[in-house]
Amino acid sequence: MNSNYKLDISYIAGLFDVKGIIKRSKKTKWHWKIEISMPDRNVMELIHETLEFGSLLKKEKQWTWTCFDKDCFFVARILWAHVNVKLHKIEQIIDYYEPDIQELGDNLIDLDLEREKRK
């Protein structure tokens, strides 16, 4: 596989929308799992090399890329802007690891406070 070639994130997000799964389980604490499976080894290797997270294994006739827990958070943040079908699940992962990432008013600036800071 050519390590100089990386896939476009929107392409990976499209594959994830079609072929990917997100699982959440609870034993002692919540555990997340993101998985993409397909028979094409070359595409799966490129996904693994592009995302730089997770592991790639062959299960029966399928190649499966998998990541767990905190790696799911990093992958979710990468895919978030490009995913359509599984957007709600991606947002659940992001909200789980960073619940305060998007509070109401986060994108607003208090002009009086900013003026005081800049004096």
Image: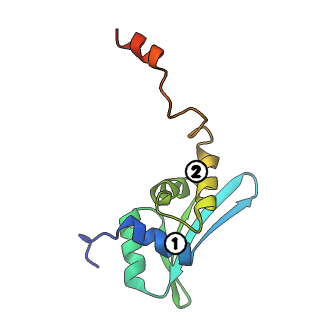
Q: Nearer the viewer, residue 88 or 1?
A: 88
Q: Nearer the viewer, residue 90 or 64?
A: 90
Residue 42: image tag: none
Residue found at x 51% / y 64%: 83
Q: How is the image coloured?
A: rainbow
Determine whether 89 is above or below 114 in the image: below
Quarter of the picture holding the N terminus: bottom left
Which residue lies under the disc numbered 1? Answer: 16
Residue found at x 59% / y 66%: 86
Q: CA distance from mark 2 to mark 1?
A: 16 Å
Residue type highlighted by circle 1: Phe
Which residue lies under the disc numbered 2? Answer: 94
Residue 93, image x, y percentages: 61, 54
SS label for mark 2: helix
Residue 77, image x, y percentages: 49, 53
SS label for mark 1: helix
The disc, 2 or 1, on the residue closer to the chain's N-terminal end is 1
Residue 18, image x, y percentages: 55, 77
Q: Nearer the viewer, residue 35 or 102?
A: 102
Task: Name the side, left or right, on which 115 lies relative to 54.
Answer: left
Determine whether 58 is above or below 17 in the image: below
Within 10 angstroms of label 2, few (less than 14), some, or many (20 or more) residues? many
Q: Is label 2 in contact with label 1 (beta carbons under 8 Å)?
A: no
Residue type highlighted by circle 2: Ile
Residue lying farthest to the right in this orientation: 27
Residue found at x 23% / y 69%: 4
Task: Name the side, left or right, on which 15 lies relative to 31.
Answer: left
Quarter of the picture holding the C terminus: top left
Determine whether 20 is above or below 29 in the image: below
